């Protein structure tokens, strides 16, 4: 379920003007910067500053903490529009807003909200540390331990594949505070850990298949002392719940990213089909090419409709675990199909690095894996169906 600390929507006219401004920024500033982002494997600092100035790091944070106070529909639509550009731009801010600010808003103490949220809105970079070498889908199987001391806790463990780890200012780290897992998953707590804390180190960034410009690495915690007020919500055993609440938002964000990027990929496929000639005419005139274009368009429309429905339900305060998983599963698989078709539409050119289709194909692959694999979304959907059946709903 999404957090109950839901803020009111941004005024509709103001939001519409913001989206128009964002669309221009994406096409005029972000898309032209993609080659530089790929070459550096980073979003350049001046562009990050422009993204901050646009308010992008505070879209889902309430106005009282310096954010712009969008509701879920508006925040997810913003992510969809941003995702016309290379995925690295969303990655730079999505952990801040969807995962870490979301967890603090839902489960943090007043002091944690007052301390961390304005910093995250200002553009301090956050990381979300759940996955470990021996636990990914089985998130509750994590081994990182937080042992209570007189003044706070000492953390030991390794987090793996953590987005933003090489340049994050703060990480929300999920760790065991007890051997006891009753009530369910009560052994997991969440800690706000400044990355400059003694004992925190980061591995070299992993070399990835795609999504250049967004780096992942291990976070290694060796006898990291944190004060008691680093514990999210000030209560042990809330970490797993906080992580799962963040994941519902994270899943909608990935679904929006996949849907926005699929639209960009299809645009590139259509352009190529209109320009490329074979047998004396543009390949867009061939019905088998048209079938690939039409299937892609229809599937993008379906994902957009699912996003609109799921976010509307979230804004009504409904429980949307099933819808978030279904939307993430469909949109991520759909983006993969669209990327594959657009490679096919490009023919041999689709296999060359010189054309964008090859990059789109590699970039799209991760959407089916992180924030819960397609198999994990299937399990969530089926479990919800079985639960609802049991309740006679
Ligand atoms: C680019 C990138 C960025 C990432 N960013 C972050 C981040 O910021 N923070 C973070 O905490 N993690 C992050 N991750 C980790 C990511 O969330 C995990 O890789 C993902 O959840 C899968 O876990 P795993 O890799 O351990 O795979 P496993 O859990 O080992 O799964 C392997 C395979 O088994 C299947 N499987 C597992 N359990 C079941 C089951 N019960 N039933 C059926 N099939 C099953 C999976 O679907 C998959 O096909 C990132 C990963 C990548 C690649």
Image: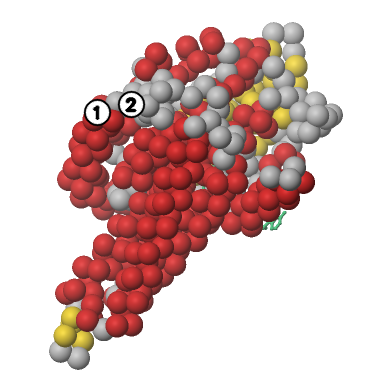
Against 356, is 367 above or below?
Answer: above
Name the element at disc 1: helix
**Image check: 332 left or right of 272?**
right
Give the Cα distance between marks 1 and 2: 7 Å
Q: Nearer the viewer, residue 7 or 220?
A: 7
Where is residue 11 drawn, in percent x and y?
29, 26
Against 62, is 205 above or below?
Answer: below
Q: Confirm or reject: label 1 Cβ below 8 Å from ligand 1.
A: no
Name the element at disc 2: loop
Against 56, is 342 above or below?
Answer: below
Q: Residue at x 52, y 22 (%)?
A: 5
Outermost residue to the front:
392
For mark 2, does the 10 Å Cα neighbourhood hold few (<14), some (14 to 19), or many (20 or more) residues?
some
Say which residue label 1 marks.
14
Q: Residue at x 47, y 18 (%)?
A: 116
Where is residue 111 drawn, in percent x and y?
53, 9
**Image check: 209 left or right of 235?**
left
Say which residue label 2 marks.
10
Outermost residue to the bottom:
279
Asked whether residue 287 appears in the rendered view, the answer is yes
Q: Residue at x 76, y 28 (%)?
A: 186
**Image check: 233 left or right of 253?**
right
Image quadrant where one finds the C terminus: top right
For mark 1, does the 10 Å Cα neighbourhood hold few (<14), some (14 to 19), or many (20 or more) residues?
few
The image's mark for residue 144 is: none
Where is residue 185 drawn, in percent x and y?
76, 33
Against 216, is 152 above or below?
Answer: above
Where is residue 156 drawn, in percent x and y?
69, 29
Image quadrant where one finds the N terminus: top right
Residues at circles 1 and 2 in contact by the CB criterion of under 8 Å: yes
Q: Nearer the viewer, residue 181 or 163?
A: 181
Q: Residue at x 20, y 37 (%)?
A: 21
């Amino acid at each position: 379920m999404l957090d109950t600390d839901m803020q009111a929507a941004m005024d509709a006219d103001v939001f519409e003007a913001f989206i128009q401004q964002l669309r221009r920024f994406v096409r005029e500033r972000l898309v032209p910067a993609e080659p530089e982002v790929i070459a550096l494997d980073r979003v350049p600092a001046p562009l990050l500053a422009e993204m901050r100035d646009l308010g992008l790091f505070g879209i889902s944070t309430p106005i009282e903490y310096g954010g712009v106070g969008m509701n879920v529909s508006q925040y997810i639509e913003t992510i969809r529009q941003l995702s016309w550009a290379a995925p690295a731009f969303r990655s730079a801010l999505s952990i801040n807003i969807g995962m870490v600010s979301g967890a603090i808003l839902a489960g943090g103490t007043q002091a944690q909200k007052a301390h961390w949220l304005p910093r995250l809105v200002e553009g301090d970079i956050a990381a979300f540390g759940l996955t470990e070498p021996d636990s990914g889908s089985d998130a509750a199987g994590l081994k990182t331990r937080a042992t209570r001391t007189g003044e706070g806790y000492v953390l030991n463990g390794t987090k793996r594949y953590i987005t933003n780890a090489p340049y994050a200012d703060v990480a929300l780290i999920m760790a065991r505070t007890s051997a006891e897992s009753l009530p369910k998953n009560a052994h997991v707590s969440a800690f706000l850990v400044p990355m400059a804390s003694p004992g925190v180190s980061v591995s070299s960034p992993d070399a990835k298949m795609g999504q250049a410009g967004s780096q992942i690495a291990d976070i290694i915690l060796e006898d990291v002392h944190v004060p008691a007020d680093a514990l999210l919500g000030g209560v042990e055993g809330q970490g797993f719940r906080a992580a799962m609440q963040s994941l519902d938002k994270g899943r909608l964000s990935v679904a929006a990213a996949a849907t926005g990027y699929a639209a960009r990929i299809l645009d590139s496929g259509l352009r190529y089909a209109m320009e490329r000639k074979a047998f004396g005419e543009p390949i867009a005139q061939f019905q088998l090419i048209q079938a690939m274009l039409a299937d892609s368009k229809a599937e993008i429309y379906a994902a957009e409709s699912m996003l609109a429905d799921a976010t509307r339900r979230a804004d009504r305060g409904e429980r949307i675990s099933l819808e978030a998983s279904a939307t993430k599963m469909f949109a991520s698989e759909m983006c993969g199909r669209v990327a594959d078709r657009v490679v096919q539409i490009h023919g041999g050119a689709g296999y060359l690095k010189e054309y964008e289709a090859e990059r789109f194909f590699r970039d799209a692959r991760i959407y089916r894996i992180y924030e819960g694999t397609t198999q994990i979304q299937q399990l969530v959907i089926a479990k919800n169906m079985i639960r609802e059946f049991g309740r006679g709903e």
